Amino acid sequence: MSENVALLLQTHGLSVRYGGVTANADIDIAVGAGEIVGLIGPNGAGKTTFVDAVTGFTRSSGQVLLDGARVDRKSPHRLRNAGMARTWQAGELFADLTIAQNLAVAVQRVGLRALFFDVFTGSPPPAGVVEDALAKVGLTDVADRRPGELTLGQQKLAGVARALVGGTRVVLLDEPAAGLDTHESREFGGELRRIAADGIGILLIDHDMSLVLDVCDRLYVLDFGKVIAAGSPAEIQDDPAVIAAYLGSAEVQADAVEKG
């Protein structure tokens, strides 16, 4: 990581335990402004648990810092207000709302009653925030459409826009490219680069290795809840521990890159 990059997100010794099971063990990661940082590993390695812990959905020990300030005791909505947001593996868009309305929901006041009045009685979010988020992912032209009218790739980008709306500085993306074909994945990666170019820090979890190796500046590899490697995509591809735990043989890696 370049010394000139401002750190936005850091974790120190982050651990998650469920009874006698350790899901995350002393994880240290850093995401800088304008960086796309990958978090990869086999199924069950603890990647989603890590995101849950960082964003306040799972209790953890250790430290989470946003812009250098500890936020590991904050609730998810307070973290959102502070500038950290996430996406989910399952699609979180409301099918009966337009894309713009889906984004507006993300910046409404907390509580079902407030949500009802803000969305369905016309109380708007702060001027420009929805439009700015849609512009960041290239979806301005589909703001008035419903999710079912969009391609899968556009739906995925709408989910990212929903996480970005309202001044998000760090976004954690949990398998956002799942289900995309090669062409859609490549376009999605291009949009992620555009987002990062605005100074937003991105932590990307995905099993699409062509996407991850292409767009990420740095990678962390989890296995059994522990970081087993960290470095550039080139360094990670050559790491024997990573090959054994996740990437597989050189032939498998070459095939993944070729598909990209």
Image: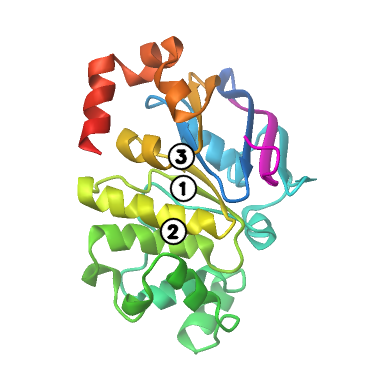
**Where residue 166 sits in the image (x, y, percent)?**
59, 69
Q: Considering the image in quadrants, where does the C terminus appear?
A: top left
Q: Considering the image in quadrants, where does the N terminus appear?
A: top right
The residue lying at 67 percent from left, 44 percent from top is: 5
| Marker disc for residue 173 | 1
**Where residue 217 sits in the image (x, y, percent)?**
50, 38
Mark in the foreground, 1 or 3: 3
The mark that comes first in sequence, 1 or 3, is 1
Quick one: 102 or 134, which is closer to the camera?
134
Residue that badge 2 annotates: 160
**Where residue 131 sits in the image (x, y, percent)?**
48, 78
Quick one: 3 or 93, which is closer to the camera?
3
Q: Secondary structure at mark 3?
A: loop
Q: Amino acid at mark 1?
A: Leu
Residue that badge 3 annotates: 216
Question: Most prominent secondary structure in the magenta stretch?
Answer: strand
Mark in the foreground, 3 or 2: 3
